[in-house]
Structures are given as structure tokens and as C-alpha cells.
Amino acid sequence: MAGNIKVIVCPDAQSVARSAAGIFAALIRAKPSAVLGLATGSTPEQTYAELARLHREEKLSFAKVSSFNLDEYWGLDGDHDQSYRYFMNTNLFKHVDIRPWNTQVLNGRAANPFLECQAYETKILSVGGVDLWLLGIGGNGHIAFNEPGSSVDSRTRLVSLAPSTIAANSDGRFFKDPAEVPRCALSAGIGTIREARQLLLLATGAKKASAVAAAVEGPFSPDCPASLLQDHPGCTFIVDKEAAAGLKAPRN
Ligand code: F6R
């Protein structure tokens, strides 16, 4: 199965961000009402900064764009400074002209998580599906909060975080103490993500090297959730040299 994922290796994280933002900008210019899938975490921060610059300096307009975020911590309000709604507002949404009502981030305090997840899936369908979904990858190969063991046809749902994810997200970049990290999240499923027309996964730094190698060159297996993108017809990884270090086959 391995082989379908296109891998672009860039010299550094800044050029990963520039390439990714360029792909988003080209889509939005070609289709102003594009439906974007978005991710949070450290990796896409520079991409969002570059998209904000393109809006400011090169008139890239998000006025007709709609967006769907991958996931949200269960139990956090959208105004909590570690919620993904807050992350998106501060890193991207407030810097561009996207309409707030066109931005979908799962509600981590919904009264009924099942209904919240169902409504999110219905909303994606109602706008015709996601054109391009930006993804990161966990050191354990997760995409969104689909931890190892998640099935290829999983849908948006309430999930538990793996201990390694709790540790990674409390290394001081986000939470300072593992005890502060919510144990659960609402997450788009792997099946949900795979329905996007194009997928763009970014990875930077040596900590991602083994997950990137497993995703691209390893077996198609829930042990590495990102490997479940191998048979997607439009999946590209943009990685820096450090994150590419575990790949055996030569790339660009
Ligand atoms: C975030 C998400 C996660 C991250 C992954 C990598 O919305 O879905 O899968 O993409 O944990 O996070 P960083 O970029 O912080 O290394």
C-alpha cells in the first residue's frame, strides 16, 4: 500500500510554512469559497502567520472561506487560553477577514458530545466537503486526536488522549503540567479526514522523524494512524530535513 503519499522536503520549518501557506493561498484564490480543514499545535503556527501576512500584504481574502478544525479538548471553554478555539482566534482568525460564523471548532463543553460530533459531520456535508485539510502528526503517529488503534473509518467522536500525547502537550509549549491536560477530546475521525479532497500534513523537527517514516514507508496500519492516509489520492506531506531523516527512499 505504501507509496501514494507525496513527500516534499524543505530545508527548514520556515520554508515548510511558506510552501504550505502558498498551497492554501492558491486554493483560496482559485476558489474564494474554499472549505478549509485546519489544525492546531506548534507546527502550523508559522503557516498561519504567513497566511496572515498574505492577507495583510497581498490581499488574500478569507471573506467567503469556511473552516473546520480537527479537534478540541473536552471540558475546555472556547475562551480558555489552551482551547483550540482560542488558539485559532489568536493565531489566524483575528488576523484575517474570515467571518466568525464560518469557522467551526468543536465545542468542548457541549451538553451532548455525540450530538455535537454529529452536527459537525452534517455541517461538513452541507458545505460540500472539505477541499484541503491541514494536518500535523503526533510523535506516536496520531492525526487529530486519533491515537494509535483508531480505525480507518472512524468518525468525529469523543476520544481519550494517549499518555504520550498528554506528555507532549505538557512540555511547556502549551500546558505546564500533565495534570492540567484534559484526558479527552472531541476529534474528527480518520474516516472524516480521509473524505477531504486534498490533505496536507506538515512535520518539523527530529521528534517527528520516526512517525513520518512509519506513516510514509511503514505498513498501512492503525498502529500509526497517519499511515492510514497512504491510499488517499491527494495526500502530501511537507517536512523539514530533520523530520525527513527517517525516510529510506530519496525524496525531491
Ligand atoms: C492538532 C492536532 C494534533 C497535532 C499533533 C502535532 O489540532 O490535531 O494531531 O497536529 O499533535 O502537534 P504539534 O504540531 O504541536 O507537534
Image (tube, helix red, strand yellow):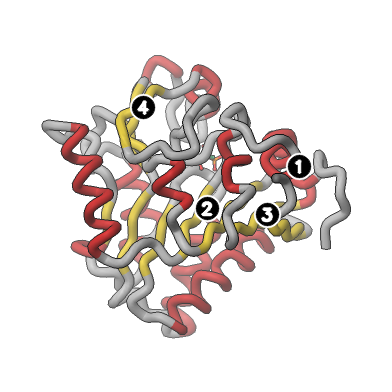
The amino acid on which the numbered mark 2 sits, given as a three-letter code, is: Pro
Q: Earlier in the sequence, mark 2 or mark 1?
A: 2
Q: What is the CA distance from the residue labelled 1 to the residue labelled 4?
A: 27 Å
The residue beneath circle 3 is 5
Check the image and report above or below for 90 versus 171: below
The amino acid on which the numbered mark 1 sits, given as a three-letter code, is: Glu
Residue at mark 2: C-beta within 8 A of ligand 1: yes
Question: Do callouts 2 and 3 mark residues in contact (Cβ within 8 Å)?
Answer: no
Residue situated in front as seen by the camera: 9 or 80: 9
Q: Earlier in the sequence, mark 2 or mark 3?
A: 3
The residue beneath circle 1 is 217
The residue beneath circle 4 is 159
Q: Earlier in the sequence, mark 1 or mark 3?
A: 3
What number is the disc on residue 44? 2
Screen quadrant of the C terminus:
bottom right
Question: Do callouts 3 and 4 mark residues in contact (Cβ within 8 Å)?
Answer: no
The amino acid on which the numbered mark 3 sits, given as a three-letter code, is: Ile
